[in-house]
Structure formats: C-alpha cells, structure tokens
Amino acid sequence: PPRARGGFVALAVLCLAELVGVMDNTIINVGIPTLGRAFSASTTQLQWIVDAYTLVFAVLMLPGGHLGDRIGRRRVLIIGLLGFAVVSLASALTTSIAVLIGMRALLGVCAAMVFPATLSLISTIFNGTGHHALAVGLWAATAGLGIALGPVVGGLLLQYFAWPSLFGINIAIVLPVAAAISIDCCSAVQGNSVILHRSTASRGAAIDIGQR
C-alpha cells in the first residue's frame, strides 16, 4: 500500500542519517597514522581526535533526544545533519590539530542530535503498524553496520584520496539526506504529517512531527 511504501522510504532515509553518525565514530581510526604525519601530532593529540567525538556523542545523546521532544524531532534532525556537513567541511580544510580536535567534538554534538531523532521518528512513523518491530530492528542493524563500515570506507578513501576525504564523505551523504527530510520525506505517512499524541497532564496536545 502507498502508506507502507512511504513509511519504508522514510525508514531508508532515517537509517542513512543514522549510518553517517555511527560510521564517523570509526572511520577516523584507519586515518590516525596519516593524520599523525600530516599534522606532526603527538600520540595524545591523535587519541583526542578519536575520543573527542565518542565522548561528546555519548554524553549529549540523552540531552539531544530531550531537545527533540521539546522543539521537534524533525527540526533537530535537520539542524544536526546540516551542522554535520558544515563541521565536516571545516574539518577537511583545517591546518591545525587543535582545531581538528575541536571540530571532532562538534561533530559529536551533531551526531548526538541526529541519532536519537532517527529512532524517535521511526517509532512514531511505524507506531500501531505491523512493521514496527521490523523498522526498529533495521535501525539497530544499521548502527552495527555503520561501526563495521567505518574502517572499510576509511581505508578505501585513503587508498585513493587524501585525509580530507574522511570528512568529505560525510558531506556527500548528509546533504541529500537533509534535503529529503526537508521536503517531507518523513511525512509520507498519514498524508503530509506524522502525528504523535502525548498523553501527559501538562501537554496533552498533539505534536505535528511533519511540521517541526
């Protein structure tokens, strides 16, 4: 049915958004020797290139989900994706190891906005359907796939391109995904919007995910 097809199109887009955030967690690992030579970086600095992303991502994931509840998951998702593209571009152009570490931390902030928003939107889109468990299972499988793909994609990029390609791949993925979400790809279910009813005493009104 059209509704089911629209839901799975949205699922594919949201899983792709999730994939880039998870993949960026490990794609940098194979580039550490190359970055060490390019920046004449110490072992500690190289370790922070990896850890800055992971630590910020882990710490801000719950606040990122809460922010989506407050101002709209779709809005937070688009902001996170666009931020990911901008920070990735800055990372690819930097000539300072300190700036690169800071950019990796900012990428972690963006990932913390994207990751919980994808799951929330998927759960909302497939709520009350027979495909809810399948959709959440595919989302979880995408996370595992992203962890495994990171080193593979990173190695392929470094085989043919310079280290900035490790960040350029982010831009190539997130911009089309953000465009798809902004043109209501994730509102393909229930007409032009996805409605989430919140049964709380303080906020009993429906929230229009498709317009946020």
Image: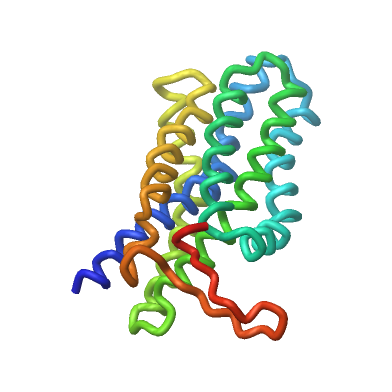
Res 115 quadrant in image: bottom right
Residue drawn 61% across the image and 31% down it: 87
Query: Where's residue 190, x and y in %?
Result: 34, 72
Query: Where's residue 184, x and y in %?
Result: 37, 54
Question: In this picture, is 67 found above or below 94?
Answer: below
Colour setting? rainbow
Residue drawn 55% across the image and 25% down it: 89
Residue drawn 56% across the image and 34% down it: 30
- Left or right of 73? Residue 173 is left
- Left or right of 184? Residue 26 is right
Residue drawn 76% across the image and 35% down it: 48
- Left or right of 104? Residue 179 is left
Foreground residue, 100 or 42? 100
Question: In this picture, is 183 found above or below 197?
Answer: above
Query: Where's residue 67, x and y in %?
Result: 68, 59
Query: Where's residue 145, x and y in %?
Result: 45, 55
Question: In this picture, is 185 found above or below 162?
Answer: below
Foreground residue, 105 or 64? 64
Res 205 quadrant in image: bottom right
- Left or right of 86? Residue 157 is left
Foreground residue, 142 or 110? 110
